[in-house]
Image: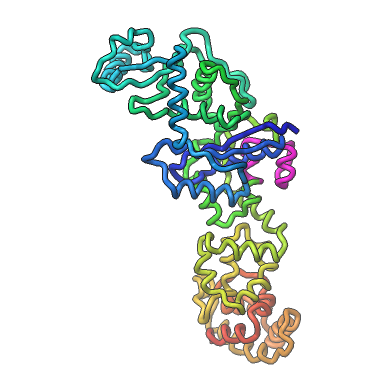
Amino acid sequence: MTADVVTRFAPSPTGYLHIGGARTALFNWLYARHTGGKMLLRIEDTDLVRSTDSAIAAIGNGLDWLGLDWDGEPVHQFARAERHREIAEHLLTTGKAYRCYASPEELNEMRALARAEGRSTRYDGRWRDRDPADAPTDVASSIRVKAPRSGETVIDDLVQGRVAYASDDLDDFVILRSDGTPTYMLAVVVDDHDMAVTHIIRGDDHLTNAARQKILYDALDWPLPALAHIPLIHGPDGAKLSKRHGALGIDAYRAMGYLPEAMRAYLVRLGWSHGDDEIMSTEQMISWFDFDGIGRSAARFDFAKLENVNAHYLKEMGDAEIMATLIEELDYLDGGPEFQASLDPDRLYKLREAVPLLKGRAKTLVQLIDQASFVVRRRPLDLDEKAAALMTETACDLLKRLEPHLASVEAWSTPQIEAAVREFATNGGVKLGAVAQPLRAALTGRTASPGIFEVCAILGKTETLGRITDRI
């Protein structure tokens, strides 16, 4: 084990923890745990206009729910602005950076002329070698790094391999704005160095940033951390991930009833693999995770696969564990608060009895509470369209005749209820289904449910007879 590995997850708190960010956090966490190292959390809140306390809280809550703990206290980038300015001034003093007095209007004119002439609109270095004595007195200066003018900047990436950028494509970018605020490019380099980050694992849309950041590392004579730029996540159609594909916040997946262990197991397979293993425990992920399992092609998000993975974990959970998880998550689930409001001690007991029957039929916790709604619903039940269609005059007559037959059952248990219903059907010369279907509709309000005899047993004799009576 390499005890000195340090990774970091560095989200911008301008919104929720989205699915791509969660996957990045997971990869950083897994590699840190795999090597016996640390994963740090840095909140990149330099954009004060867009950064919010609620977004910071959402990021922390999302990581907590996913089970991705970080080491130490979160670092807030904005609080380190003075340190960033100090490094910018150091680069200026050592001749690795220079003051640029080009006004916004002048820069716009430069870009417009370059476009008109078919040239690159990158900054042309007009103040790079100019005498500071020429500086105008009415323009506040920014500070730009002196990027190499020849050759190329090379990134040896742990995932992407060798990536080279011609120096002509990398301009003298701003590291300190004219108002004295540091840019993202400078702040990231300084923070990663000061936090002793050894491995930067992030999306491959940051590759160009990596080239610019390497220029700063070289100018500061700091060692460049190992870089691993992981493929982005696309939709099933290969297009850039959007909300219709699943580009939602982690809180949305929690609300839809997905389990954190299922989310980890699904996310880890978006861009990383270990042989043909599809389902793996967190312990296995930690043991197996390394960069050689990460591909270069964009991963494809698939809701159907996520549901199947979640269904697997739901089925593997013990009944008591499912019940505890369900109760704990009701505040967060779609429809959960309404479901919870209907739970009293009696219905809570019945729900526990129903869980073993329902867990194999549901793929998410939301589906579970939807299928368990027959337990908590109050009389008289509203029937859905299909159930209502079953309640013909003939069906209602059958239920009317069935009610006293069920009322005579003394030992109210699944076998006794089944025996009574079968006897009723046989004596009445009707098929069992002709009785069971309207009975199911009357008891659950739907045409699909667990076994109808188990439903009767769970509801109890009084509730079962009462719901039948409501329909006759």
- Across and down, in percent, residue 388 comes to 51, 75
- Across and down, in percent, residue 249 comes to 50, 48
- Residue under the image location 44 percent in, 36 percent down: 78
* Picture layout, residue 84 above or below residue 34: above
**First to last magenta residue range:** 265-288
Quarter in which the N terminus is drawn? top right
- Residue under the image location 70 percent in, 43 percent down: 278
Residue 50 in view, yes or no: yes
Q: Judge by depth and name the residue closer to the eye, 388 or 315.
A: 315
- Across and down, in percent, residue 455 comes to 65, 76
Does residue 57 appear to the left or right of 308 in the view shown? Answer: left
Colour pattern of the rendering: rainbow
* Picture layout, residue 187 above or below residue 302: above
Q: Judge by depth and name the residue closer to the eye, 442 or 319.
A: 319
Q: Judge by depth and name the residue closer to the eye, 445 or 99.
A: 99
Q: Is residue 271 magenta?
A: yes
Q: Give the residue furthest to the left.
A: 138
- Residue under the image location 62 percent in, 37 percent down: 28
Q: Is residue 98 magenta?
A: no
Residue 433 in view, yes or no: no
- Across and down, in percent, residue 472 comes to 54, 87
Q: Judge by depth and name the residue closer to the eye, 323 or 421.
A: 323
Determine the image quadrant of residue 2: top right
Q: Tally the marks.
A: 0
